[in-house]
Each structure stands twice: as structure tokens, then as C-alpha cells.
Image (tube, helix red, strand yellow):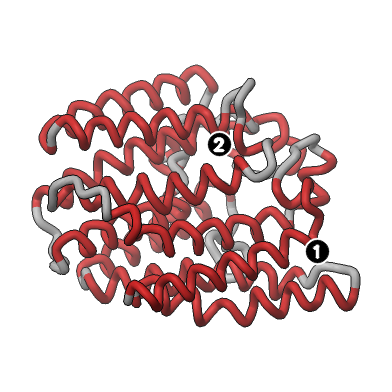
Amino acid sequence: MPRFNPFDYFFILRPLILIPAWNFLLIGAYLANRQAAFTIDIVIGLLAYTFVAGGGYILNQIMDIETDRMNKKLFLLTSGFVTRRAAYAEIIILWFLALIMSFRFGWLFVVFIIVSMLMGVLYSVPPMKLKGKPIFDTLANGIGYGMVNFSIGWLLVSTFAPLMFIRFLPYCLSISAVFINTTIVDVEGDRKAGELTTGVFLGSKLSSISSTLIMGAAIVLAYVQREYICLIPAAVSWPLFAYAAGYTLLRDGVNRKVTIASFRLPGLIFTVITALLYPIYFVVLFVILVSMRIYYKKRFGMTYPTLARG
């Protein structure tokens, strides 16, 4: 059995993919009052949502443990560094703490936190397991990150307003487009694993065309609404979506490099924009990335993250 390391229980939260969730929460808070500051409420809310999202990512790993073992990835659970029982216990602790912290911001904030938890369960756990149901996997990501995530940030600094969902719509569309392209590069592996994702269901051509059109809609809507925080990453990455779609149509194949770039670039730009709004965020990101490099090198003898492997 692997030697105990307390840092395993932090890195099982997958901090690299927590970054987009942090981005959207912070942007949601900024959209609410056009102010960007790491107040005590922002810090507590961000920590609470980290517990919610991190618990969801652990649950997803538990449900995919056999597939991940076959694909030799996400070693913490598949190789026994963290037991399944300990992982479930961590989810319970994280979600309990998140709920306790959420009461600071009122009952409606608590409702959105619970909705986010439920979406995490529905996304990963059978029989619903939305991540294995075409179209619903895309909707779950678009709504989860593009609506619920933003709403939680908004409610940290402002009151509920139904019109906020209209403002979030271009973000929801762009996130949905990005997600579709992530399923395209995983079509073969998902098909072998029996996962019926949007990419598997629609096929590479129709998926790529759909994501390009959805990202185009996000650009138009962001421009009309003057949501420049969304417009910039959507517009800059759209040519990659269009190129990837054209490639699949003309060459009857997938250009993996361009497709991967198409869904990584928007996230990178969102992260830079978020850090420009909240300069201290650059420090947070630096600490996270450096700690990951040190942890994975010492624990597994591997260099991660890298530009090539994300």
C-alpha cells in the first residue's frame, strides 16, 4: 500500500480544473457590481465553492475509477494512494463545510450551493450519469459552469436578479461550445469505454460544426450585451473552432492539435482576464501551479502540469 501523504487529500481535488470554476465565480461577482476585490466575503465564498466543486471532482473520479485505471491516469484513487472509503469521507466533510459556510450569505445562496452539489451527483452517478448522456452532458456543463457557477459569484456581492441569467447566457454558450470540443478528442476512448457523450453521439463532424455555431452565437450575444469579458475569449478562439470544423468536413478526420487548442485557449484567456481584474489572483495561480509541479515530481516522479499535458 502506498505511503500516506496528507497532500494527496488536497490534490485529489484536482486544483488545475478548479481554476475555471474560480474564474467564473470571480467574474460573476465582478458582473454584479463592477468591482473586483478579494474581500472576506469573496474569500469565504470562493473557499465554500472550492469545497463543492472539489467534492464533485472526487465523486467523478470514484465513479470512473476502473476506466481511469485502464487509461493509467488520475493515480490517487486508481493506485490506492487514497482509498475509496476515504474519498467518500472527504466528499461528506467538504460538502458539510461548504453548507455551513454558505449560511453566511443567505438562504438563496445555500440553494444554489445545494443545486451545484446535486448537479455534481447527477453528472457522475448512475442511473442519471449525465456525463454519459449526449446533449445532457453539454447542458450540464453549460448550465453548471455558465449559470450556477456565475450565480454563486453574483450572490456573494449582490441580490438575486432574474435578468442576471440573460447576462450569463453568452458565457453559458461559450462554455457549452468548449465542452463539445473536449468530447471530440475523446471520441475513440469514450466509445471503447461505452460512454455515449455528445461527441460520440453526433460524431466528430456534426459536433465540430455545432460547437462552432454555438461559439458564434456566444460572440453575437456577448457583443449585443457588451459582455466583453466573454466576447474576447470567444472571438479570439472562434477561428480555431471554424478551422477544426472545416478540417473535419474536408479531410474526414479530426485535427487533434487545433481542436485541443480551441478548447484550451478560451480557458487561458478567461484566466488572464480574471487575474487582471483581481491582480492577487496571479499569486494564487502561481502558488497552485508551482505546488502541483513539486507534488507530482516528488510523489510520482512526473512533470505535471505542462503545456502539452495541461
Residue beneath the point at 30% across and 42% down: 49
Q: Is residue 31 left or right of residue 94?
A: left
Query: Looking at the image, is mark 1 or mark 2 earlier in the sequence?
Result: 2
Res 6 visible: no
Vertical placement of 2 versus 200: above or below? above
Residue that numbered label 1 is attached to: 205
**Quadrant the N terminus occupies:** top right
Residue located 30% across and 34% down the image = 113
The spot of residue 189 in percent (x, y) is 79, 47
Is the C-beta separation of discs 1 and 2 under 8 Å? Answer: no
Left or right, residue 144 beside residue 304: left
Q: Where is residue 46 drawn, in percent x and y?
A: 24, 48
Q: Residue at x 17, y 50 (%)?
A: 43
Quarter of the image for residue 38 reads bottom left
Disc 1 to disc 2, C-alpha distance: 35 Å
Front in this rendered view, residue 126 or 285: 126
Residue 216 at x, y percent in the picture: 56, 73
Q: Which mark is residue 109?
A: none
Return the residue nearer the eye: 14 or 131.
Answer: 131
Bin the neighbour count of mark 2 within 10 Å (Cα to Cα): few under 14, some 14-19, many 20 and up: many
- Classify mark 1: residues with Cα within 10 Å, few (<14), some (14-19) or many (20+): many
Point out the image quarter for the C terminus.
Answer: bottom right
Q: Amino acid at mark 1?
A: Lys
Where does label 2 land, which residue? Answer: 76
Asked whether 181 or 71 is in front, the reply is: 181
Please state which amino acid type lies under the numbered disc 2.
Leu
The residue positioned 48% from the left and 74% from the top of the image is 219
